[in-house]
Image (cartoon, coloured by chain):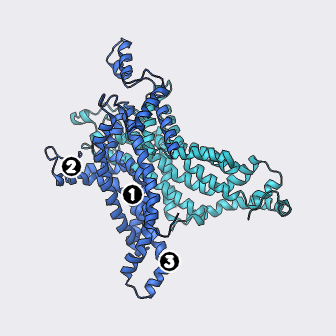
Amino acid sequence: MATTVSESANVLSLPAPASPKAGGERVKARGEIAIVWSRFRRHQFALIGLGALLFMLLIATVAPLAPWGPNEIDRSITEPQYLSHGFAPPSAAHWFGTDELNRDLFSRLLWAGRISLAVGFLTVGIGATIGIVIGALAGFYGGWIDTVLMRITDLFLSFPFLPTLILISAMLHQYKFNADVTVVQVSTIVGVLALLGWMDTARLVRGQFLSLLNRDFVLAARALGADGRRIMLVHLIPNSLAPIIVAASLNVGGFIIAESAISFLGVGVSPPTASWGSMLADFQSYLRYSAVAVLLPGGAIFITVMAINFVGDGLRDALDPWLRNR
Amino acid sequence: MAVTLVLASVLLFGILNLAPGGPFDARIASAHIQDTSYLDRLNKMIGLDKPVHERYLIWVSGVLRGNLGESWTIARGQPVNTIIGSRLPNTVMLMTTGLLFSLLIAIVIGTISAVRQYSLLDNLFTAFSFFGISIPAFWFGLIMLKFFGLELKIFPVGGIYSVGHQDDLLDRLWHLILPMIVLSLLQVAQWSRFLRSSLLETLRQDYIRTARAKGQVERLVLFRHAFRNALIPLVTVIALAIPTLFGGAIFTETIFNWPGMGQLLIGAVGALDWPVAMGVVIITAALTIVANFVADIAYVVVDPRIRY
């Protein structure tokens, strides 16, 4: 098994049949997506999850069409009890009623969804990129690069996730930036979450790389004179993509929960900007006035995360039948 | 391991000290005090006038001697050790009962699911575990508080005991139930799935077939033969869940006004009391490391097949 590049005799014989295969590969690549989709489709819950997720993305996209602005206060509500503590009941003007400041709950929910979903997907994008780069470098080059990068990974893993997240977010809250509040808040949260959430991807990619490095097709590519960058980008990363996608899709849900968690604790998204978590934080003090107001934002997080978990599960089954859990 | 902990503490300390100004800046500003010498005096009192590396050395030499420093704002001048010491028992009680409760429920659910695989009950439990891992713990807590505390008034809405009932054990248990359930949900969902697959795999082993072939009663096959091996991996899972459990305790304590470490952390962070916050995080980190260590040891103790 311990084949090395120097054993060029048997490796060199590979390229000849490999060239027609390259043409066939492209046809297969298109077919692969179809195969994955057909396997995914068989997973009933995954389809439901995909539907729910698309619905959530849709309502987050159309938030600007909502009847009220995210911070618009309805001053036409004059009944004394609603004037004093908000939470007017559902009506034609406010489909889900209003919140503690008589802002439209429905519209605010849509705007909050934008923030929550954006944080989830952006964080996974950035976190996965950091993880892929670090894992790829560590796995491909080995030696001291591997040692240093993996020690750094261990270092980040040794931080207790939630307390550290709270500490760093609280520290960043002290800064005042001269920019749009929402943009600043979203980018700091995405930054902190990505900083604390790339390690599992890095380990995954490194492991994949180590198991692929001695495969014949990689040795063949090396023998053909491909440089490290080409081997990584063309051969190793595409072949490690399945588990990366599965892990990333499941991470989206985790990051959405993490964002809502720190917003709930008051160090994430803060008023007047709303995310589902910060809405719950606001309603915490008004529990006795409204049940709907508590159920809705949490329900939105719950449905989104559940949908993402279903989709991730379906993707795992579809992309790699051997990863299937019992 | 020790190197990682030191590096982690340097990083955390450094990051926290990136924050502009000190804990008193906002108060001075809101009190409209123009005289900056007052602020300087306050900052000097808590040692903020020294450069960062010097402050770190002072702090870390204290930590190595078991002294986490002094609180800045939430209990000005009190040793962090005392503050944490007064909160630790509450968190430990919450976490221990939560852990035992989740373990009990998870074992029951996991066993039923594995023995009656694909039955209606198994499918229900599967749905429940998906529910459990997707639901945000703090939302679940708020719902429980709203319905069982505020609407039905079956359970108290927070705190660890009613006024004047400090020594009443039943009263304390009554206050413990809701937080314990909220803290356990995620663990039950994860562990029951884990135990189910572990038990299913064990039940497929040859020695189980042998036990059945020799005419052993099914109940004994399960509890005497399968259970012992199926529970082994759970030891690691439980030890590794301790940091998660502490994370859950932060929400549970915030929601149910439970005076523990998690609530302390949130309070300290809100008041920019970095020594207290750092103390809580360092203790959590140490707890995590100890838990990992215990997991390794416990694995060898419960599984005689493993010898190093």
- Residue type at mark 3: give it: Gln
At x 75%, y 57%, the residue is A218
Residue at left offset 15%, top offset 43%: B163
Q: Chain of mark 3?
A: B
Indicate the quadrant containing the N terminus of chain A: top left, top right, bottom left or bottom right: bottom right
Estimate the spatial distance between the alpha carbons at disc 1 and disc 3, rounded to whole Å: 27 Å
Chain that the image shows in cyan: A
Residue A276 quadrant:
top left
Q: Which residue is mark 1?
A: B187
**Sequence order check, earlier mark of 1 and 3:** 1
Real-space Cα separation, disc 1 to disc 2, in angstroms: 23 Å
Q: Which chain is blue?
A: B
Q: Is disc 1 in contact with disc 3, using a CB cutoff of under 8 Å? A: no
| Residue type marked 2 | Pro
Instruction: Return the x and y of residue B7 as percentages of the image width and height.
Output: 52, 39
Q: Measured from the top left, where is residue A115 in percent x and y?
A: 47, 40
